[in-house]
Image (cartoon, rainbow, N blue to C red):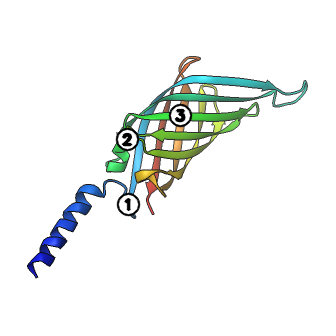
């Protein structure tokens, strides 16, 4: 009986030490602030007389800083690389593809749907899953994107999430 108990004890320690963040059925709320630089921008003009005037697309790169949410999975995103590919129309709406890459190389993928404002945009973020501890993660939240200059931007983001 003794070797069996020792084996169970070692297995428990192994699970605690090596399972890492993102346990099954875990829930949390991430809150962060990001700094982004415009890296690409293009605009396509509509034909004369079209009420929406143009369509735009671009990319942004930067860092996200964790400022709320207590789980290990929330803290993994602190200082992660943040990439945004976006498309918007002249009618005031758009969407984007957000990718967060941690220092360890794990990726979290999200989509945003936005309403363009005079200073940037606001909208909804939908988590689409990811790699490593973000595998199968789902969630939804909001963002507030502000253009500070023609190159520098900030983005306040928050979402509630859960793992399968």
Q: Nearer the viewer, mark 1 or mark 3?
A: 3
Q: How many numbered discs sit on the rendered protein? A: 3
Query: Taking 113 as reference, is 53 above or below it?
Result: above
Q: Can you give x and y, in whole percent of width and height, for residue 119 in the image? A: 60, 25
Residue 83's tag is 3
Label 1 and label 3: CA atoms lie apart by: 26 Å
Residue at the farthest front position: 3
Residue 139: assigned label: none
| Cβ atoms under marks 1 and 3 closer than 8 Å | no
| Image position, residue 78 (x, y; %) | 37, 37
| Marked residue nearer the N-terminal end (2 or 3) | 3
Instruction: Kindly state the secondary structure of the residue where label 2 is placed.
Output: loop
Q: Which mark is residue 104?
A: 2
Q: Residue at x 46, y 50 (%)?
A: 131
Q: Where residue 147 sits in the image (x, y, percent)?
A: 56, 23
Q: Nearer the viewer, residue 144 or 13?
A: 13
* Residue 26: mark in rendering: 1
In the picture, measured across the screen, residue 56 lies left or right of residue 48, that is left
Locate residue 124: give its quadrant. Answer: top right
Q: Are marks 2 and 1 in contact (CB under 8 Å)?
A: no
Front position among marks 2 and 1: 2
- At label 1, counting other C-alpha atoms closer than 10 Å, the crowd grade (few under 14, some 14-19, many 20 or more) is some
Looking at the image, which residue is at 50% across and 54% down?
139
């Amino acid at each position: 009986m003794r070797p069996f108990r020792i084996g169970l004890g070692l297995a428990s320690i192994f699970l605690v030490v090596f399972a890492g963040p993102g346990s099954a059925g875990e829930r949390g709320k991430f809150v962060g602030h990001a700094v982004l630089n415009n890296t690409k921008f293009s605009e396509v003009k509509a034909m004369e007389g079209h009420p929406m005037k143009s369509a735009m697309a671009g990319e942004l790169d930067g860092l996200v800083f964790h400022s709320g949410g207590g789980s290990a999975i929330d803290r993994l995103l602190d200082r992660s690389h943040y990439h945004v590919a976006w498309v918007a129309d002249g009618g005031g709406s758009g969407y984007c593809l957000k990718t967060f890459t941690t220092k360890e190389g794990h990726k979290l993928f999200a989509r945003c749907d936005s309403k363009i404002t005079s200073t940037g945009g606001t909208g909804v973020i939908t988590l689409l899953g990811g790699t490593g501890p973000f595998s199968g993660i789902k969630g939804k939240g909001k963002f507030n994107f502000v253009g500070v200059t023609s190159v520098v931007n900030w983005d306040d983001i928050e979402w509630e999430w859960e793992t399968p």
